[in-house]
Image (cartoon, helix red, strand yellow):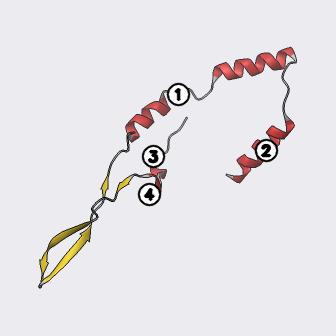
Amino acid sequence: MKVDLTSLAASQIPVDRGANKVSSGNLSGTQATEDRISFHSGGLSVQSLTSQALNTPAVRQDKVNDLSQAVANGTYQADAGSTASGMIEHDRK
């Protein structure tokens, strides 16, 4: 499994927008303000997610074994509707 850390969208990063106007002092008799944003992890760090992804096997061998056994026994029954829906959904991505 490969994790691409460079493809995080800005919309996926939690943003704390509390008290977004901060005084920056008095400039020529007028009070100027600036926006301030602070970023936080939201409970899960990139390192934690990366570690979890790297410790997950790329192949779920138990599923492969179960399917292989069902095919060998002749008990595997494919649902054509589910298969077609899955293919269409995959193509939309």
Tell me which amino acid carries mark 3. Leu
The spot of residue 8 in percent (x, y) is 47, 51
At 85% across and 26% down in the image, what residue appears?
Answer: 77
* Residue 20, image quadrant: bottom left
User: Type of residue at label 4?
Assistant: Ala
SS for callout 1: loop
Q: Is residue 14 above or below residue 43?
A: below
Label 2 element class:
helix
Give the Cα distance between marks 2 and 1: 27 Å
| 92 with respect to 44 (left or right) | right
Give percent across and percent down for residue 38.
Answer: 29, 55
Query: Label 1, label 4: how many angstroms apart (C-alpha)?
Result: 26 Å
Q: Are marks 2 and 3 in contact (CB under 8 Å)?
A: no
Q: Which residue is mark 2?
A: 85
Which residue is most to the front?
19
Dot 1, how many residues are within 10 Å of its Cα: few (below 14), some (14-19), or many (20+)? Answer: few
Look at label 1 and name its amino acid. Answer: Thr
**Residue 74 locus on image (x, y percent):** 88, 18
Q: Which numbered disc covers residue 35?
A: none
| Label 3 SS | helix
Is the residue 10 above or below the residue 75 in the image? Answer: below
Label 4 secondary element: helix
Q: Which is nearer the N-term, disc 4 or disc 3? A: 3
Left or right, residue 74 beside residue 37: right
Q: Disc 1 vs disc 3: Cβ atoms closer than 8 Å?
A: no
The residue that label 1 is drawn on is 56
Q: Earlier in the sequence, mark 1 or mark 4?
A: 4
Closer to us: mark 4 or mark 3? 4
- Image location of residue 55, percent across then percent down: 48, 27
Tag 3 residue: 5
